[in-house]
Amino acid sequence: MLTFFRRAAKSRIGTWIMVLVVVAIMGGFALADISNFGSGTLGFGMSTGTLAKVGDQTVTEREMSDALQRRLQQARQEHPDADYASIMPDFEPILDDLIDQRTLIAFADKYGFPLSKRLIDAEIAQIPSTKGLNGQFSEQAYRAFLAQQRLTDPQVREILAGGLLQRLLLTPIAAAGRVPVGIAKPYASMLLEAREGEAAVVPADAFKAGLQPNDAQLQQFYAANRARYMIPEQRVLRIARIGPEQAGVAASDQEIAAYYNANKATYAPSDTRSLSQVVVPDQPTANAIAQRAKSGANLAAAAAPAGANAAVTTLADQSRQAYAGVAGDQAAAAVFAAPAGAIVGPVHSDFGWVIVKVDSVKAGGGKTLDQAKSEISAKLTQEKRKGAIEGLVDKVQNALDGGSNFSEAVAAAKLPVTSTPLITANGNSRADPSFKIAPELSPVLQSGFQMAQSDEPEVVTLPNDAGYAVVSPAEVVPAAPAPFASIRAQLAADWITDQALQRARAAAAQIAAKASAGMSVAEAMKSVGVALPAARPVAARRIQIAMAQGPVSPALRMLFTLGAGKSQMGAAPQGAGFFVVKVDKITPGNALSAPGLISQIQGELGRAASQDYAAEFLAAVKRRLNVKRNDSAIEAFRTRLLTTGG
């Protein structure tokens, strides 16, 4: 019951696309249109292309195939040979997510909970891939983003709307959930339960002695495990970069001079001054102070007869602009026209009458046109290159939109083209192990493996303002098993490991059975007839597993799944063999000795209850809106994915 909301609770408005549709920000590409499978209608009056219906909202085969393709792309980032069969456990959760999303949209439509276009626009503008080189939303970048992700503007808006509604409708419902102490106490006591027992390791390496396969055995093993030796799909990618090197522009002398003249104040000589000043409320007092100061008196001494009416301050290293902000333009003009040591004033300001002594002057050198030329040139060239790059992107995209192929589009824009060797989706080349794709071209690699060879080339935005790149697959070599002769040594090693694991499994099962029958683990190990590492005692409280910051050993977890006197075997991590655990003693916990733990469990159960409230609300909405699943179409679609790959 908590599954949906726990998934949902992990998503935020700004990252809804990354969570539901993938990262990146969205990753993946569409399959061929499969909405034409079959004809007519199936269950509940829905067409064969509709998998579920909620009010006016539907979940179609096309949408589901897009979501599954994106999930497949995620899986291939870790396992390049992943296929639809390997992600089939995610089929129902993905379908449920889409139905849940449509349910919230249908509920909002029915009960007058609209989301404005402006609100969705703001969410689109927050997607990093929709920003141009200046960091602002760019229509061109958005178009490229949609093309790269094989999405339309309405699809993006619908995804964002689902995320917004999820937060606005479900979060308030889940705001408060409370669980009584009486319910929390048994759970807290369970965490304090202590157990003692024995554990032993049965390593596969202990059973490898004497294993030497012949060719017949290896051929049989190869045939049974062909999928383990698949060479993943390989591609040759054609890449044309659009960056500063391709822009080919630089600021001219005329442009540099024009910029210098328009910004003379920036490059004009300037100085800073350290000042002492007195501010008084009336002119006669100011005149008297100025007279005494000009006669040689210290400014503070000259102001002393005015008493509390005179405010004496010092200001260090003042620019004209900074001082004008303090005393006003009239005072600043007079002070910065006077030499060091001069007494200026009285001058009227917003705060009264000001008398100023220029204590010191630090001259600041300006820059001539020649001195500022390189600085201005770099600034103007960068700005011109940004415009030129965007222009090249527009030119290429327009050519592609007009039907040009990769070669025609990049040739028209005069872009240099590079081709990779045959590479896999992770960028490695079996033919050239030294080949490495540039880190900034990672999005290009991803797009190049998402598209079909017949698809329109893509313009991909590169990270860190590195520009853009046009990509298209020039050659696609489907995944295939490696030739037997090229991997015979690997097959032999794998066969030996497999046989040793089978022997280790049988030995571990024998030890566990004898230990469960009353024998100690150490005694049971002697009956195997192979030298094994000695058994060792294990002891822990259940709370240690619950509070562990890092991974917990499978053996320790198993200690808390068995009854007293029972033993069980399990697989050791990384295929190293097996382990056997026996529970010798169980000591129940008593949470009354730890009231703080009861409160903690009460809080955690309350949060789980809050999530359950939200899930129940969603279930009630589904019943009210009469959600309908087209089960026959769903099963036909699932079968088609597994048999034909879409």
Image (cartoon, helix red, strand yellow):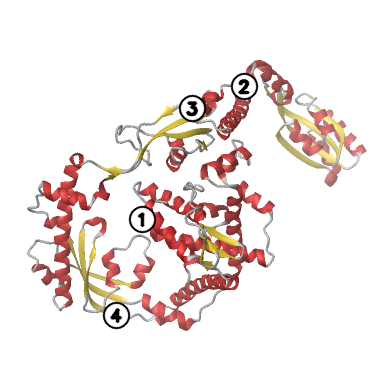
Q: CA distance from mark 2 to mark 1?
A: 58 Å
- List the residue tagged with mark 3: 407
Q: Looking at the rendering, which quadrant does residue 559 occupy?
A: bottom left
Q: Nearer the viewer, residue 412 or 547?
A: 412
Q: CA distance from mark 1 to mark 3?
A: 36 Å
Residue that appears at 51% across and 52% down = 18
Q: Nearer the viewer, mark 3 or mark 2?
A: 3
Give percent across and percent down for residue 28.
47, 47
Pointer 3: residues within 10 angstroms few (<14), some, or many (20+)?
Answer: some
In the rendered view, would you say 288 is above or below 532? above
- List the residue tagged with mark 4: 587
Q: Left or right of 563: which side holds 633?
A: right
Do the numbered discs 2 and 4 sit on residues whose CB atoms are within 8 Å? no
> Which tag, 1 or 3, sits closer to the chain's start?
1
Q: Amino acid at mark 3?
A: Ser
- List the residue tagged with mark 2: 377
Q: CA distance from mark 2 to mark 4?
A: 79 Å
In the rendered view, would you say 147 is above or below 545? above
Label 1 secondary element: helix
Label 2 secondary element: helix
Q: Amino acid at mark 4?
A: Thr
Residue that appears at 14% across and 61% down = 503
Q: Nearer the viewer, mark 2 or mark 4?
A: 2
Residue that appears at 42% across and 51% down = 646
Q: CA distance from mark 3 to mark 2?
A: 34 Å
